Each structure stands twice: as structure tokens, then as C-alpha cells.
């Protein structure tokens, strides 16, 4: 078992497969020209598997593949197949562009749930946010997953003045579709143009939805990061991830492995532990994992208070989201 000094059990590992991506979402990438990490410095397939096995032996029950865009990695299918053999729930967060090509591997690996990021239902706005004209491809891949009875959660980062006017359209989408929309509070990372007035809070999102729909809270799982809700008569549901205004740190069970093999004990931690170099030097990585998690701060990496109105994103000492693995 892996625990921190506050007694939180850590049994959920998020593995970033790459910091590369075929999208350019402005809220995720650094402002300046960004050089993706060369392949030799990324964890190789066998290294990912070796590290994952160490975590699983310590009680990890769930692994999420993320990135960057995890499915642009050339050996994504092999990695998914190999991790699918482990006794864990394997899930993925993806921008949804490469689902069709990888569907056989996803099914073979027993993947039951996929989170797809989609911040708008309008093709022109999609292009503005991602700088790629692939809206229809993502939408048809979502349909493909539903046809194959794979659970779909849609991640929508809500940004004032950009897509907050579409919240009710996303809710309308859940009327006849068994999808869960996850509205995410916009989070600050260095260089991502975050300002507190662009952030739409849990309370604001709920009050927008409550204008048009009857909202019923649903009790969640113990380590849920999302507050869940349903709307009577809707096949799907929605949830809100309120990292900024109502963080869920007290029940956090997450560890993050970056694509270059560094362990981060929190999305907002300013430190990281190099597991890949230790693995390549044939050192025992378990004591490093334990020490890293033991040092985890109580809340938001010890860097962000909940008085986000005064927060300056550029004073936060952290990687950009694309290099952490969201
Ligand atoms: N490329 C994949 C995707 O877009 O789903 C996986 C990686 S992405 C970094 C993971 C999630 O983080 C996405 O749902 C994305 O919308 C979210 N994300 C990125 N930057 C964010 C930010 N500044 N605030 C809130 N969520 C963010
Ligand atoms: Fe790529 Fe996902 Fe970041 Fe968009 S949110 S740039 S798709 S990693």
C-alpha cells in the first residue's frame, strides 16, 4: 500500500504516454513555441509496463492513460494491450481523434470507459480552441464508442465568454444519450492565459443549468473528484470538477507519472521524483515512490489557496498541463 502522511491511500495511477499532441488547446499548452520531448527520453513500452507492475503490486487498482494526447504515440496499441493484462481498471483520457484506428486494441484490452475532451459543440469554435479542424471526426468517434457500448464521459473546460453559453446545449445532449458531461473549472498553469475572471465556478455552472433543468445531486464514490448530478428524464448525467472553488484533496488517491518518467504526487506539486533514471540504473524505485507520496502536501500541492481571485498563474512553479498529463 502507498500512503501519504495524512493517511490517504494512493491506489490510482495516471500515466502520461507522451507530451506530444495533435491539438494546440491554448489552455493546456505553454504560450511559447514548445519542443516535444524526444522519444528516447520518454518511457519506453517495457519501462511503462515495469513501472506499472510495481505500482499494481502496491495496491494500485486503476490506471488512466493520458498525455499530451496518449493515442498519438506510435506504440499506443502495444502499451494498451500490455497494460490490459494487468489486474486493474484501465481507462483513457483522449481528445478522441484516433479512436477509430485504435478501437480493436481498446476493446481487446477490456477498456469500458473513455473520457473525451470536447469544449464546444460548434465546429468553428472547436477550431479556435484546438487550432485543428477535426470537430466532426471527434463527434463521429464518440458515436462509435457509444455503438460499441463503451462508456463515454465528455470533459468540457468551462471558460467565461468562450463556451459558458453552451452549458445548456451540453446538458441537452444528455437527454437521449447515455453520456456524462464533466464540466471542469478552468485551472491555472504557467503560460496558459488563466485569469480568475475567465473561470466559471461550480456555483455559476449549477445556477446556469438550474435555469432550464431540474437538477438532482447524486451521491458519488469515495474518491470522486467530481460532484455528480442527474436530470429527471435524461439518459445521461453531468458532473462538475471544482478543483478551484471546492477542491477534493481530502480524499485524493492519485499519483501521476509524466511521460519522461517523473512521479508527481499532485497536479499542482512543485517537485517531482525521477523514477525512469532510477529504473534505467537498475535501482529500487519503490522507496522513491513511497517517499514522494509521503511528502504530498495537504491541499493543491501547497501552492494554491482557495482565494483564487488574487492568484497569478505565472507565479505557480509547475509544468504546463500538456507535460504533466491531465
Ligand atoms: N489530450 C487528452 C485530452 O485532451 O483529453 C488528454 C490530456 S488533457 C491534458 C487532459 C484533460 O485536461 C483534458 O480534458 C483537458 O481539457 C484538461 N485540461 C487541460 N488544461 C486544463 C486547464 N487549464 N484547466 C482545466 N482542465 C484542463
Ligand atoms: Fe492536446 Fe489534450 Fe492538451 Fe488539448 S487538452 S492540447 S488535446 S493534451
Image (tube, grey):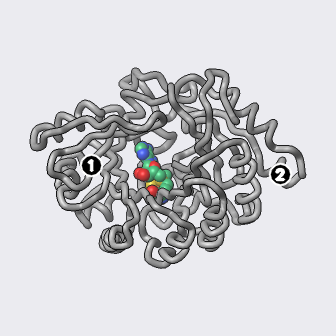
Task: Name above or below for residue 19 compared with residue 315.
Answer: below
Q: Is residue 69 visible?
A: yes
Q: Which residue is at 70% across, 53% downward?
A: 52
Residue 56's label in the rendered image is: none
In this rendered view, identify the residue nearer to me: 29 or 117. Answer: 117
Q: Which residue is mark 1?
A: 237
Is 121 left or right of 103, judged from the image as shown?
Answer: left
Residue 138: where, in percent of width, then height?
36, 69
Q: Are marks 1 and 2 in contact (CB under 8 Å)?
A: no
**Between disc 1 and disc 2, whose residue precedes?**
1
Q: Which residue is at 60% across, 47% downward?
A: 61
Task: Name above or below for residue 262 compared with residue 42.
Answer: above
Is label 1's Cβ within 8 Å of ligand 1? Answer: no
In this rendered view, identify the residue nearer to me: 205 or 239. Answer: 239
Q: Residue 20 occupies which quadrant of the picture? A: bottom right
Q: Residue 90 occupies which quadrant of the picture? A: bottom right
Furthest toward the left, the residue is: 212
Is label 2's Cβ within 8 Å of ligand 1? Answer: no
Neighbour class for label 1 at 10 Å: few (<14), some, many (≥20)? many
Image quarter hosting the N terminus: top right
Q: Which residue is at 45% across, 71% downward?
A: 99
Residue 164: where, in percent of width, then height?
23, 45
Residue 32: where, in percent of width, then height?
52, 52
Task: Name above or below for residue 296 compared with residue 148.
Answer: above
Q: Is residue 35 visible?
A: no
Residue 280: where, in percent of width, then height?
85, 55
Q: Which residue is mark 2?
A: 279
- Identify the element where label 2 is drawn: helix
In this rendered view, identify the residue nearer to me: 275 or 290. Answer: 290
Amino acid at each position: 500500500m502507498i500512503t501519504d502522511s495524512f493517511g490517504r491511500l494512493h491506489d490510482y495511477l495516471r500515466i502520461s504516454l507522451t507530451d506530444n499532441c495533435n491539438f494546440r488547446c491554448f489552455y493546456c499548452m505553454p504560450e511559447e513555441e514548445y519542443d516535444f520531448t524526444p522519444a528516447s527520453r520518454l518511457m519506453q513500452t517495457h519501462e511503462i509496463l515495469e513501472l506499472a507492475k510495481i505500482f499494481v503490486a502496491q495496491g494500485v487498482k486503476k490506471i488512466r492513460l493520458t498525455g499530451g494526447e496518449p493515442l498519438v504515440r506510435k506504440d499506443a496499441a502495444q502499451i494498451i494491450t500490455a497494460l490490459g493484462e494487468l489486474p486493474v481498471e484501465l481507462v483513457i483520457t483522449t481528445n478522441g481523434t484516433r479512436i477509430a484506428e485504435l478501437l480493436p486494441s481498446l476493446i481487446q484490452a477490456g477498456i469500458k470507459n473513455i473520457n473525451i475532451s470536447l469544449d464546444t459543440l460548434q465546429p468553428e469554435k472547436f477550431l479556435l480552441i484546438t487550432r485543428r479542424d477535426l470537430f466532426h471526426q471527434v463527434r463521429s468517434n464518440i458515436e462509435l464508442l457509444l455503438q460499441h457500448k463503451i462508456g463515454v464521459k465528455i470533459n468540457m473546460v468551462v471558460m467565461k465568454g468562450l463556451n459558458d453559453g453552451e452549458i445548456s446545449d451540453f446538458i441537452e445532449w444528455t437527454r437521449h444519450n447515455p453520456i456524462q458531461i464533466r464540466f471542469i473549472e478552468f485551472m491555472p498553469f504557467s503560460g496558459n492565459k488563466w485569469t480568475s475572471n475567465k473561470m466559471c465556478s461550480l456555483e455559476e455552472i449549477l445556477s446556469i443549468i438550474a435555469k432550464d433543468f431540474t437538477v438532482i445531486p447524486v451521491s458519488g464514490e469515495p474518491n470522486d473528484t467530481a460532484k455528480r448530478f442527474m436530470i429527471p428524464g435524461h439518459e445521461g448525467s453531468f458532473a462538475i470538477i471544482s478543483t478551484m472553488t471546492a477542491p477534493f484533496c481530502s480524499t485524493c488517491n492519485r499519483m501521476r507519472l509524466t511521460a519522461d518518467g517523473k512521479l508527481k504526487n499532485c497536479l499542482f506539486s512543485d517537485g517531482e521524483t525521477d523514477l525512469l533514471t532510477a529504473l534505467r540504473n537498475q535501482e529500487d524505485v519503490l522507496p522513491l515512490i513511497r517517499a514522494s507520496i509521503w511528502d504530498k502536501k495537504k491541499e493543491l500541492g501547497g501552492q494554491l489557496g482557495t482565494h483564487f481571485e488574487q492568484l497569478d498563474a505565472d507565479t505557480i512553479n509547475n509544468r504546463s498541463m500538456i507535460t504533466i498529463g491531465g
